[in-house]
Each structure stands twice: as structure tokens, then as C-alpha cells.
Amino acid sequence: MKKSTPALLFALVIFSTGLNACKEEKFSLDSRGAGSLATCQAMGKKNRYEDMINCLEAFKSRAGGAESSATAELAIADAYFLKKDYLVAAEAYNGFIEAHGSHHKVPYAYYKSGLSYFRQTPKSVDRDQSQLDNAIKALGAVVNYYPGSPYANEASEAYKIARHKQAQKHFNIGRFYYRFHEYLAAVPRFEAVVTDFTNMGLDEESFYYLIASLKKTQQTDVAMRYFDVFKQHYPNSPYVKKTAGLF
């Protein structure tokens, strides 16, 4: 037994050294904090998102310079996005925007923030859509303030879909209130569709239900003003004749 002890100790040392080498491979940085970003990002390609995030945090803490820090922050947000932890990703993208407002990657951060919020919302408009406003706001920032950015087209498409979902949500809630004779509650929902979410395919029905709700709440003058707008913009709509029958 005594003769085997040195061999056993040697084997343990080799095993321990191998483990440390593996750990070093996952989170190592060179003396300048450079050269490890690609290593961190490669972990994401293998779905090792927690390792990727830890690696990037290490990179950020040791890498010198504002640009390296900004790059790490954005990569961390991307890692959370890949992990499908969308609310945390959105917060990380927003933090990047606040900290680096003049950075050339700000349009990208707005786009990915909006996309994160959008993916957090259920597909059905009848379920919780509380993050939809945030999605529209972030995507709209790309569309309105960075139209020449490489992310403008993709942001625009997502923006249109998000706005259509928001319009559909208002319309569905308005119909719900209307069906149960809660006309005062229905008015602002249909009003939102015809004023804030035009050309979404819901305008004509929304005008009809809005005007009908206004009539039922004795707001005839307001109803007539909306009817004039309705006739002007949709003179050939079958809902115009139907709406005229309300007066």
C-alpha cells in the first residue's frame, strides 16, 4: 500500500490539473482582457448560455476600455435573448442604451429590446399583452429615429405586427364591453383604433361600434362628427349605410 501512494498522489495531481485547465478554458482572459470574446460567444453556439453569460461577465470585468465594456454589455444582452429570457434581455438592452446613448449599436439595441418585449407577449390577443406597449415603443424608435440603420426594415415589420396586435386587442375589448352594454367603456377602445391604429383593417367596424356606443350614451353630436369623418374616408364602406341607420 505504501508503494502505491506516490502513484496515487501523482494521478490526483494530474486529474486536478486537468480540471483546472478545463475551467480556465471556459473563462480565461489574456493579460489585456482581449481575445476571449469569441470564446464566450462560441459557447452560445453550443447552447451553453449560462457559461456564455458568466464568460462575458468575466470579460467585462477585466477588459479595458469603454468600447470593450460596451461590446460585452451588448453581448450579455444577446446571450439572454438566445436563452429566451426575454424580459431580462430587454432590460439589458435598455441598460446599454442608457449607458451608451451615442454608440453606433444603439439602433440594434432598440430593435432587440423591442423584439424581446414582443416575444414575451402571447400570440393570442386575448391573453396578457402587457409588454406590447414596450415593444411598440422600442421598435418605433428604430423606425422613427434610425430609418437608415441596417435594422430598420426588420424593426418596421415587427412594429407593424405589434401595432396590429395592439389594435386587435383594443377592438376585442371594445366588442366585449359593447356586447355587455358597457357602452361608456367601449367608446375609448374603438376611439383608439380609429385615431391611433388606422389602416389596420379594423377601421370600418370600429367606426360603426364607436358611433353606436356614442349614440347609446346620448353623445349624438360627437357621434355625428365621427360619422362625417367615417363617410369622408370610407365612402364605399358597407358600414356607412349601416351607421346611417343609427341616426
Image (cartoon, helix red, strand yellow):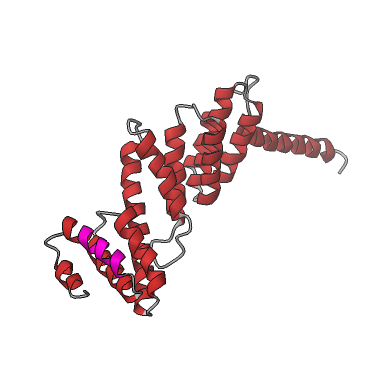
Which quadrant of the rendered structure holds the C terminus? bottom left
Where in the figure is residue 197, as x and y percent of width and height? 31, 54
Q: Who is closer to the viewer here, 151 or 211?
A: 211
Q: In which quarter of the image is residue 187?
A: bottom left
Q: In this view, does 171 lie above or below 145?
A: below
The span picked out in magenta is: 220-229
Q: Is residue 11 above or below residue 90?
A: above
Which quadrant of the rendered structure holds the N terminus? top right
At horizontal 32% and vertical 43% (from top left) the residue drawn is 156
Q: Residue furthest front?
A: 221
Q: Who is closer to the viewer here, 21 or 242?
A: 242
Q: How many labels does the image show?
A: 0
Q: Is residue 221 magenta?
A: yes
Question: From the viewer's perspective, is 202 left or right of 12?
Answer: left
Q: In which quarter of the image is residue 63?
A: top right
At horizontal 51% and vertical 40% (from top left) the residue drawn is 93
At horizontal 46% and vertical 37% (from top left) the residue drawn is 109
Q: Is residue 147 magenta?
A: no
Q: Which residue lies furthest to the left in this view?
A: 236
Q: In this view, does 189 lie above or below 132?
A: below
At horizontal 55% and vertical 48% (from top left) the residue drawn is 88
Q: Is the magenta stretch mostly helix, strand or loop?
A: helix
Q: Residue furthest right?
A: 2
Q: Who is closer to the viewer here, 21 or 3?
A: 21
Q: Who is closer to the viewer here, 201 or 67?
A: 201
Where in the figure is residue 128, as x and y percent of width and height? 46, 64
Asked if residue 47 shows in the view, the reply is no
Question: From the viewer's perspective, is 59 left or right of 173?
Answer: right
Asked if residue 116 shows in the view, the reply is yes
Where in the figure is residue 142, as x and y percent of width and height? 39, 38
Where in the figure is residue 203, as x and y percent of width and height? 25, 60
